[in-house]
Amino acid sequence: MMKKDVLVVGELNVDILLNKVKGLPVIGQEILADEMLFTLGSSSAIFAANLASLGTSVSFCGMVGKDMFGQYVLSELANRNVETKLIIEDPAYKTGITVVLNYEQDRANVTHCGAMENLRFKDIPADQFSMFRHLHLSSFFLQKSLRKDIAQLFQTAREAGLTTSLDLQWDPDNKWDFPFRDCLPYVDFFMPNETEILALTGTNQLSAALEILEPFSNTIVVKRGINGALAFNKGDYNEAAPYLHSQFADAIGAGDSFNAGFISSFLQGKSLQENLRFGNLTGAINTTASGGTGAFSDLDSFI
């Protein structure tokens, strides 16, 4: 039987995007936003949806509540050809939601995690790993019930013959208690952005952060925004320049779209340099429309 390409394990939520917000919130006062968008959110779902739009076969394992937001998430993923049969609908929890105050090049998020933080290792069908080529996980810090088993998850996937990738995302508690010494040996591509890798290692120089992680890592892929991206493997650097354009809408999901492009290219057998370039391209495309998946609605528009 032909293997499916990617199993994504991760958080699921909807996003309410408030764009063109007039000022910063002040307790006891009200401010206005000129635009609003209700859309599929969560780093993992954006990655999965955009990866599927690139022609990769994708299945998702996660948890939503048995509510209208959960139904919306399932419907949006299915519309992007992401298989959803491994997503648990649990009536005990509410589907997660993030409210985004969007200030063009930056934003502020408020998230209710809900069901996403209750997915456990035993909910993930490890006995089906051999059906896939690759495992990806995003948003480690939002998935509280999965944290203690993160190394076991990646070790199990690698032992089943899968390649693997991990994007931690930001830690809302700012503790950065990720067991990288135990987990990263089983991660083929560790994919933080520059701010995250500095916070994780407690350093203020990228070179110092890479030096700390190198003994435990395979390939570290660092997203650097307008400075492009780099990959570091056992002392070897590969760098790729960004794709710059003038059609900027917002940067929501740009890193997830970079991940989607990079992994899509990797699974096609391309070189590390080509993976970085295609990741930069898909990350840039993401910023041409509001939200994390809007720019990928029409595959023919950018392929």
Image (tube, helix red, strand yellow):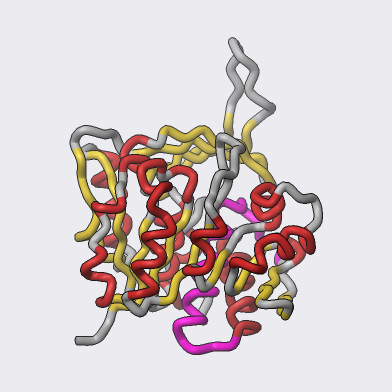
Q: Is 234 contained in the magenta span?
A: no
Relative to 69, is 221 on the left or the right?
right
Where does residue 262 sit, x and y in percent of width and height? 54, 74
Asked if the stretch drawn in magenta spans residue 257, the answer is yes
Q: Is residue 169 left or right of residue 197?
A: left
Looking at this rendering, what residue extends furthest in the top direction?
28
The part of the chain drawn in magenta is 245-271
> Can the viewer see residue 44?
yes
Q: Residue at 56%, 34% (x, y): give it.
A: 173
**Would residue 49 be visible to someone looking at this image?**
no
| Residue at 56 percent of width and 65 percent of height | 190
**Vertical placement of 206 versus 106: above or below?**
below
Q: Which residue is drawn at 61% across and 59% down?
A: 192
Left or right? Give the position of 218 relative to 103.
left
Q: Can you give x and y, in whole percent of width and height, for residue 143 in the image?
A: 41, 45
Residue at the spot 31% in from the left edge and 39% down from the top edge: 115
Residue 231, above or below 223: below
Q: Image quarter for residue 25?
A: top right
- Place of residue 107 in the rendered image (x, y in percent of width and height, measured from the top left): 63, 40
Between 60 and 103, the one nearer to me in the picture: 60
Quarter of the image that includes the N terminus: bottom left
Q: How many marks?
A: 0
Q: Choose between 129 and 182: the one closer to the eye.
A: 182
